[in-house]
Amino acid sequence: MLSRLLKEHQAKQNERKDLQEKRRREAIAAATCLTEALVDHLNVGVAQAYVNQRKLDHEVKTLQVQASQFSKQTAQWISMVEGFNQALKEIGDVENWARSIEMDMRTIATALEYVHKGQLQSAST
């Protein structure tokens, strides 16, 4: 009887061991599946971040080229405006010069008229 109880106990223990080993393998398989799923999910996110980073790098390069072109164009515009301002100043200088010459000519004309009138009056007398 004791030996039968011992055998039953050992059999139940073996069954529990087998069941525990089966559950351990299932838990390992489930943990492996979960880990793979998490890694796959993270890899998708990382891959998307990498693609986005490459797009951003391309956009930055494009923006740098456009900014450089804009800077060159702006420098050309500034040069043109400065040239235009200089031309306007020169026109103003020419206008002042013309006024000065006109005033001088009027003074000379007035002086000539005065001299001419003075000669006519001397000749009449």
Image (cartoon, rainbow, N blue to C red):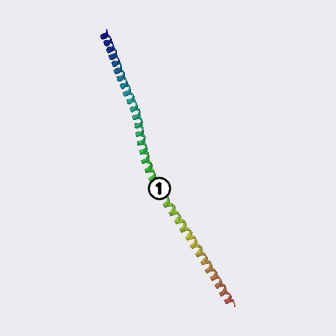
Q: Answer left or right for 120 relative to 7.
A: right
Residue projecting furthest to the top: 1
Q: Quadrant of the N terminus?
A: top left
Task: Using the image, determine if residue 108 lies above or below residue 78.
Answer: below
Q: Answer left or right for 65 relative to 115.
A: left
Residue ID at (42%, 39%)? 49
Looking at this view, is 48 or 88 the one in front?
Answer: 48
Task: Using the image, determine if residue 106 lies above or below residue 29.
Answer: below
Badge 1: few (under 14), some or many (20 or more) residues near its Cα, within 10 Å? few
Residue projecting furthest to the bottom: 125
Q: Quadrant of the C terminus?
A: bottom right
Q: Position of residue 88 (x, y in %)?
A: 55, 65
Task: Using the image, determine if residue 65 lies above or below residue 51.
Answer: below
Amino acid marked by disc 1: Gln
Looking at this view, is 36 or 90 the one in front?
Answer: 36
Q: Position of residue 65 (x, y in %)?
A: 43, 50
Q: How many marks?
A: 1
Residue that mark 1 sits on = 73
Q: Position of residue 5 (x, y in %)?
A: 33, 11
Residue ID at (46%, 55%)? 71
Q: Quadrant of residue 50?
A: top left
Residue ID at (46%, 52%)? 67
Looking at this view, is 28 or 76 the one in front?
Answer: 28
Q: Quadrant of residue 18?
A: top left
Task: Using the image, determine if residue 42 lies above or below residue 24.
Answer: below
Query: Tag 1's secondary structure?
Result: helix
Looking at this view, is 80 or 32 the one in front?
Answer: 32
